[in-house]
Amino acid sequence: MVLVLFHASAATVALITTAYHRFFLVTGSALDADTVLFFLSSPKEVGAVALSEVTLPLVIVVIISLAYAVFGPLTLVHLVFHGRTATAPGGGTVESPWLTFSGMALLAYALVSLSLLPGGGPAGASETFARDAFVNVALSEVKGSTAPLPPVNARKIRDGLPTKARLEPTAQAKQRNVVLIHLESTRARSVTPYNRDIRTTPFLNELSKKSLFAERAYTVVPHTTNALVAATCGIDPPDRSGTSSVGDDIPARCLPELLNEQGYKSVYFTSSVQTFERRPEVVKQMGYKEFYPVETMDTDGFQKANYFGYEDDVMLEPSRKWLKKNGDKPFIATYETITPHHQYLAPDKRYGRKQFAEDAVLNRYQNTVRYVDFFVKNLIEQYKEMRLYGSTIFVIYGDHGEAFGEHGRYQHDNVVWEEGLRIPMMIVDPSHPAQRIGKPVNQLDILPTVVDLLGYRISGGKYPGYSIFDLPKDRTLKFSCWYEKKCLASLKGASKYIYHFGDRSEELYDLSKDPLEQNNLAGEAPPEEFRERREELLRWYARVNAIYPP
């Protein structure tokens, strides 16, 4: 029994510790028990993600660790227990009285020798990184459950959601097509209209001059499925704990469902595989009648964009065929791109590559953003060729940003600084004059703005967002990390507040003077301001959690 337990503990510690450090190197976040369970419960979804980070040095480390786990305990137990039995009457054997103590001593040795005791982290480190890797994973589930969320009435909150909303035509109502172009992992600072120092997206730059252009646009939760819920359904999306539930129930009537009742057709295209986060079920819940993932498309001649799919031009021919068949009636169509997503392979055969950054990974990412610019151009040219451009409203938005170590984090799920939250957003309506929107907006404003442009009004329910033509004077935008109980943020004017659920100190930035969030003003703010903003965020987070069952 001691030998089996020793083997199991050594192997578990070796694998968890190795995974912990690799996870930190790739994301800048600490691995916790929920993430381990998420990976184990979703092998088809995240297996390719994990394999993409497997390197030869990592394989060598794992082999050495497992070799110790296999042979180390066997050797130690053999040395301690060999010959430690006594002969019993009748020729049998009996265990020496001290063997139990020896077994416990061996287990203690295993724990200590594999560094399971809490270690002293560097000065100023967060509480998470002050603990040993394995201990942090083991304790994260216990500690995470104590986060101070205020009590809420879940039934009352769900009753107040727009589950019975309807569109009513006004005198200005006119049936026009709606196209949502979902830009995967596209942050504002990597797009030319938001950063004149980088020439990644010349087409979007020109298009922005003809559009309703949001100068300060944000995601709500920096993760794709959650951004789809915010943009298409107009309600606050869940964190990771409730993400899978949107395949069963979205507690609001989404834009495709509302427009279906007005005689619209609806279709969803994606250059990504359909297996991630129950995409077919989610699309159906949103009200789309037709769904075309990359598995339905001819990928011959197209390059892989990453472990999730192919370069986005693979959607052009399926789009053309569908429009030729259905373009004579009003429709809503969504195009979900995938090229800028991590691994950032940046397909180079079709449009080549350019040099945008010294860092190789960042440069590949900037080239994937450049690729999406070509896709948007090609898609809009397709609509012009098919004489659909003049009768179509195009909504172009990023689902979330992407981080490259600006604040110690990478990718997007746990990034609540501007590189993770701030996105491009523009609405191209050929019948509407160009306009720049200076007030902060987020993805919740897409649904009411589209309804407004189509000349409808909403009855039977209220959505939390606003039409960009009727934005309030004072407004607080709220954000959450995708990982549950990891980080929250709020934006009031130019004041950005970040809360880390007690794992590290709160942060406060003045974006008007410090747009890159380099100067934390937390030491200068009165405690009352922190308390008010923290409590406001926790109330919002508790209400959102009540909407989506885990």
Image (cartoon, rainbow, N blue to C red):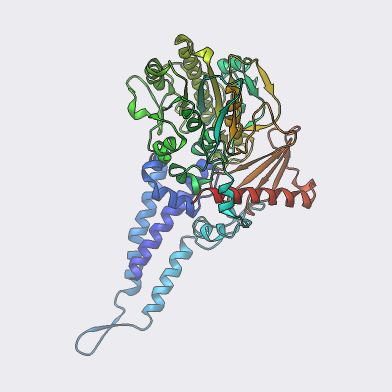
Give the x, y percent position of residue 450. Answer: 58, 26
Q: How many marks?
A: 0
Query: Quarter of the image holding residue 193?
Result: top right
Give the quadrant of residue 510: top right
Q: Residue furthest left?
A: 90
- Tell me: 34 left or right of 44: right
Asked if residue 153 shows in the view, the reply is: yes
Please give the name of the residue rendered at 51% of the width and 13% of the height, measured from the top-left corner.
Answer: 389
Question: Residue lying furthest bottom in this view?
Answer: 89
Of 178 and 494, the residue lying toward us:
178
Q: Left of 80 or right of it: where is 259?
A: right
Percent x, y for residue 267? Answer: 42, 26
Q: Is residue 75 left or right of residue 169?
A: left
Q: Position of residue 49 (x, y in %)?
A: 42, 39
Residue at (43% x, 31% y) in the render:
288
Counting from the top left corner in percent of width and height, residue 364 is at 50, 26
Residue located at (60% from left, 51% from top): 542
Instruction: Depth check: give the residue in front, 11 or 70.
Output: 11
Residue 49 appears in the picture as rendered: no
Q: Quadrant of the N terminus?
A: bottom left
Q: Nearer the viewer, residue 393 or 78?
A: 393
